[in-house]
Image (cartoon, rainbow, N blue to C red):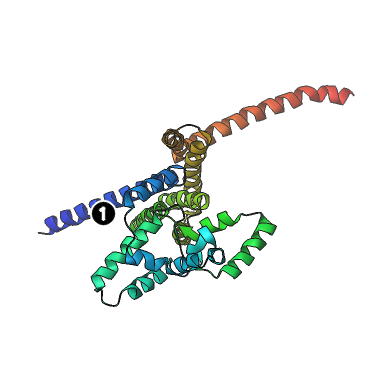
Amino acid sequence: MLGTSAAALMHGQMKAKAVSDIAASSAFWINPVLATDAAIQLDRWLTEVSQSAATVYDKALDGVYLDAMRVGSTKALGGAYHRLFDGGHDLASAWKRVREALPDDTFGQEVSGYLSAIWKDVVTPMGLPVISFDKGRYDAVAEGLQQTLGVSYEWLYDLATFTATEGIGALVGALALVLKWRQAQVKEFSEIVGALGVTAMVSLNPILAVVVVLGAARTYQLSQQKDAGKGALKGLLSGSASSGSLIATSLMIGGPVWVGVIAGVVVSVLVRQGCSDKSLDRIKERGSKFCEIKGHELIAGARALMPALVRK
């Protein structure tokens, strides 16, 4: 009986580890790919397959903007950037608009209409805002940052919004960290955090950025264990280098997007192998031997020159 229970427990642990490993690998590779131009193509494809006639719930989200269009004052709402300012497109406000759309619909209809309306908007390149902003204050902050840091209005909009692909990337990343929260060694966990961190910065994914902050806090906690600091640093560097090399290679190679992505994956695999403990140990060993040889050569050279210097 005890043997059966122990075997079942071991089987469960192995299954849980396998699931967490798959989630970690998915987050490690999917997110950098979604930080390349491949994400734009995926968003466009999702937009095409999701197109359908506007429902009363779709119109409810755009109600303020549609009213502004009728009187020709869309500029006051930001024009193409109106989702950030019309108070109807962040997740909480959108639900409120859907609830108010019809007086006699059921809760199930509202949920279905809400999910459909949100999906239609989040798959577009403009995405959805994390929260709604007051346009006057936002413009003032945007102008100040543009003058001091040189960032564009479009850059700030991208930072404040998310698309379907960014949401998927953040969800996969969060799932990986949750499943590895207690299982992973510090190097393994920090490697995922490093990869997600570079992706969040390049793609300006606000949701993934929150996931990275939480992961970084956990990495710091794990690094406080005995002899864990170096492992945390190695993991962060390995993850960052692997993710960064994939994105950089993809951007540098011309032609079809997926050619660059495949090349980026190949380079990233090589970089990750180069950052492994065994590779680093070999590099360290070779570096030590090189320094030792060069050191002996310098000493021998100095000794050979010494008599000449003494005669002078």
Left or right? Give the position of 176 relative to 8: right
x then y, percent, for residue 3 = 13, 55
Mark 1 = which residue? 16
User: Quick check: 81 left or right of 188?
Assistant: right
- Tell me: 121 left or right of 289: left
Q: How many marks?
A: 1
- Give how far across and how far down residue 123 sits, in percent: 39, 53
> Is any atom of residue 16 visible in this view?
yes
Q: Is residue 311 above or below residue 128?
A: above
Looking at the image, can residue 222 be seen? no
Picture quadrant where residue 118 is located: bottom left
**Relative to the observer, which residue lies in front, 184 or 28?**
28
Seen at 44% across and 46% down, the residue is: 40
295 or 206, which lies in front? 206
Look at the numbered disc 1 and give the secondary structure of its residue.
helix
Q: Outermost residue, front direction?
A: 71
x%, y% of residue 288?
A: 57, 34
Between 128 and 67, the one lying in front of the other is 67
The amino acid at mark 1 is Ala
Residue in the image at 46% along x and 46% along y: 35
Where is the N terminus found, in terms of image quarters? bottom left
Say which residue appears at 33% left-offset and 52% top-offset. 50
Residue 78 location, x and y as percent? 54, 63
Q: From the viewer's perspective, is 310 left or right of 15?
A: right
Q: Is residue 103 above or below residue 75?
A: below
Q: Quadrant of the C terminus?
A: top right
Q: Nearer the viewer, residue 253 or 69?
A: 69
Residue furthest to the bottom: 103
In the rendered image, the vertical position of residue 91 relative to residue 187, given as above or below = below
